[in-house]
Amino acid sequence: MTAFESARLASGDDVLAYLDFHLPEDRIAQTGAEPRDASRLMIVGEEIRHRIFRDLLEYLEAGDVLVFNESKVIPARLEARKPTGGKIEVLLLREERPNTWSAMLKPAKRAGDVLHFDDLRAEIVGQTLDGARLLKFDTDVKPHLDRLGSLPLPPYIHENVGDRYQTVYARVPGSVAAPTAGLHFTPELLAALEAKGVRRAHLNLHVGAGTFKPVAGSVEQHVMHEETFEVPRATADLVNEAKRSGRRVVAVGTTVVRALESVWDGREVRASAGETGIFIKPGHTFGAPDMLVTNFHLPKSTLLLLVAAFAGVERIKAAYEAGLRDGYRFYSLGDAMLLERQNVKRSAGG
């Protein structure tokens, strides 16, 4: 954040209020562009440029490293029945311990209640600090999710989008929401990037429903949810090599930023696995990523604070104003932007 911004925007609450916006309903994307890389791409640096996503190829150079989150969305939305026959909507959040999952229930139920999922059974055995219920299944539910469940789409998407809400490189099941910046990539674009010499690295961060939770009170009091992640040794080595050689590290999505910053030790990225609740907001000093591919996020969200911290509050303000003015499509299935990290020069063409 610049000194000018700091003087006017003294807190995260000030930043969120400054970046707040009203989005007309018809600007919330209900379907993804076809093909995927035909979505629009806003280039946000010293100036704003309007391109198509496949033009990303022009802004990257041989030796740059693209880091992807290869987590796969699981069919976590289920329908259960009470012994009396009443229906319960269930959203599985994560497996807290073997066969025991945290879940959101609608309507909510109490400990001791039993739910039936076709031929499976689960008992409510407690709840988490944030109010989710703990369901203990009588067997491992994961092999049955494809049969019993469906993809948990965000509440603002009203269409059945099928596998369009899954990246083409998703490999490791575990997310209950897609790492949506990656939805724009096609196998053809990935092949073209590889042919140009752009290097590709992967990590896993299993996206939880709390990713989209708005900041309801004060930013300083907001507590981020914990998410499971893994940064493999091969990815750490590629990122560190790029940093040493002056090449750029390009994070595909805010989940990649959160994972990389969770394992940045001040000098390099460390291979690691575990849980992260890192909350990135203006004032954060970034270590690993130099550029960020991301979508247009919800107002009053932690994701909006993250991109403002990365690119600068004024740049994000200008980018969102341009997106609203120029017809960009917002949120998970909408258009994308390529952000330069503030105070970092880039030399790529385009």
Image (cartoon, grey):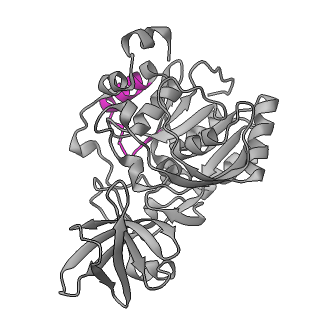
Question: How many numbered marks have been drawn onto this rendered protein structure?
Answer: 0
Expressed as whole percent of the image width and height from the top left, the position of residue 9 reads: 38, 16
Position of 23 compared to 122: left or right?
left
User: Which residue is found at the position 41% from the left and 34% from the top?
Assistant: 304
Expressed as whole percent of the image width and height from the top left, the position of residue 89 reads: 27, 71
Position of 74 compared to 113: left or right?
right
Q: Which residues are magenta?
A: 316-336
Position of 26 compared to 310: left or right?
left
User: Which residue is found at the position 34% from the left and 56% from the top?
Assistant: 154
Expressed as whole percent of the image width and height from the top left, the position of residue 159 reads: 29, 62
Check if residue 333 falls in the magenta segment.
Answer: yes
Q: Is residue 218 above or below residue 226?
A: above
Expressed as whole percent of the image width and height from the top left, the position of residue 91 reads: 35, 67
Check if residue 114 falls in the magenta segment.
Answer: no
The C terminus: image quadrant: top right
- Which of these two is toward me, 277 or 304? 277
**Residue 231 visible (yes or no):** yes
Classify residue 187 by image quadrant.
bottom right
- Which of these two is toward me, 306 or 336? 306
User: Which residue is found at the position 39% from the left and 26% from the top?
Assistant: 12
Q: Is residue 238 above or below residue 125?
A: above
Q: Is residue 160 above or below residue 219?
A: below
Q: Is residue 153 above or below residue 252?
A: below
Position of 52 compared to 328: left or right?
right
Classify residue 288 by image quadrant.
top right
User: Which residue is found at the position 63% from the left and 21% from the top?
Assistant: 344
**Residue 333 visible (yes or no):** no
- Which of these two is toward me, 196 or 265? 265
